[in-house]
Image: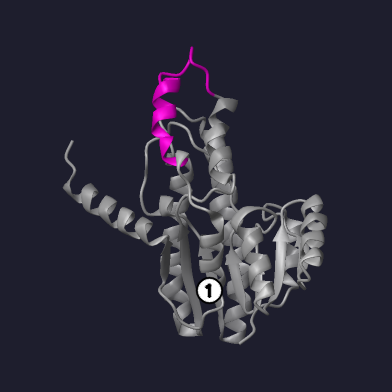
Amino acid sequence: MSKSILITGAGTGLGRGTALGLAQAGHRVIATVEITSQVTSLREEAKEKGIELEVMKVNINDPGDLRAMEHCDFDIFVANAALGEGGPIAEIPVQRLKDLFETNVFSTLKTAQIAARKFVQKQSGKIVFVSSIAGLSAAPYLGPYSATKHALEAIAQSMKEELKPFGVQVATINPGPYKTGFNDRMVEEPWKWYGPKIHFTTREQYAKGTEVFEKQFAPEDMIAKMVEVIPAEHHAFRTVWPERSEKQVKDYEQKIWEDTI
C-alpha cells in the first residue's frame, strides 16, 4: 500500500538513497534537504532516474523552514537529519557539543513534535527516528555524536508509549558504520579545534580510537533495509542493521554490566 512519507536530511548519504528508493517503490515522498543547492541536485537525480519525488528545503534549525513543514501532509515522518562530530569527550569545547545537540536532539525533537501533532489529530501515523548503533553503545572518541543519539533513543522510547493511545507508532532505525562519507567527516571535525600543545589526547590515541571506520559497509544494503522498514505496517521498534551490528551492541551492553573500575 502506497504511503506519503516526509524524510529530513535527504540531501546526502542514507537519507538521499532512501528517499529515492521509497519513491521508486511507489510511495509519495517529500524529501527535505538542508540547503538550496541540494534541492536542485536531488531533483535532477530523480528526473534522470525517472522517479517522481517532491523536494523542498527544510533546514531543521531554521524556524521558517519548520513552519513550511507544518503545511505538509504525510502519513510517515522519518527524522533523519543529523550532524556528526567525534573527538575526546574530556576535551571537546562544550559549545561544539551544544551545537551538535541543537541539531541532533532539540531540532530533531521539534520536527517530531510537528509530526506528532498531525498524527494525533488523525489518530494514525508513524514517526521513525534514524538513530545509530552509537545510540546503543559508546566508543572512545565518538562520545559527542554518541551522546546525542543516546538522547534520541530516550526520546523515541518515551514517545512510543505516550503516542500509542492515539494510534501513532514510533520506531528507531540504527545503522552501523556505512560508507557514505558521514563517518569520515565526523572523524575529521576535531582537527578544527584540536591542538597537540594544549590538549592531552595525542594524535596517535585519536587515530587508533577511530580505526573502527577503516572498514565500513556498502550503503546500498542499509538503504534497502530502510526502504523495506519505513513503510511497513508492523515491524520491530528497533531495527539495528546489519545483523552483525545487533549482536555487537548486545555484547557491548552485557560487557558494561560486567565491567569494573
Which of the two residues, 252 or 151, is positioned nearer the viewer here?
252
Give the residues drawn in magenta, as a range.
194-213
Q: Quadrant of the N terminus?
A: bottom right
Residue 149 location (% of width, % of height): 46, 52
Residue type, label 1 = Glu
Residue 123 location (% of width, % of height): 56, 86
Q: Which residue is mark 1?
A: 228
Q: Quadrant of the C terminus?
A: top left
The local crowd at label 1, few if under 14, some if 14 to 19, many if 20 or more residues have their Cα within 10 Å, is some
| Quarter of the view holding residue 133 | bottom left
Residue 110 location (% of width, % of height): 61, 61
**Does residue 179 appear to the left or right of 71 in the view shown?**
left
**Does residue 167 appear to the left or right of 68 in the view shown?**
left
Q: Residue at x 83, y 56 (%)?
A: 40
Tell me how the rendering is colored. one colour
Q: Is residue 68 magenta?
A: no
Q: Is residue 196 magenta?
A: yes
Q: Residue at x 56, y 77 (%)?
A: 231
**Does residue 214 appear to the left or right of 43 in the view shown?**
left
Q: Residue at x 47, y 49 (%)?
A: 177
Residue 55 location (% of width, % of height): 77, 65
Mark 1 element type = helix
Give the answer, above or below, for where 95 lies relative to 77.
above
Which of the two residues, 60 or 134, is positioned nearer the viewer here?
134
Give the answer, above or below, for where 114 lies relative to 40.
below
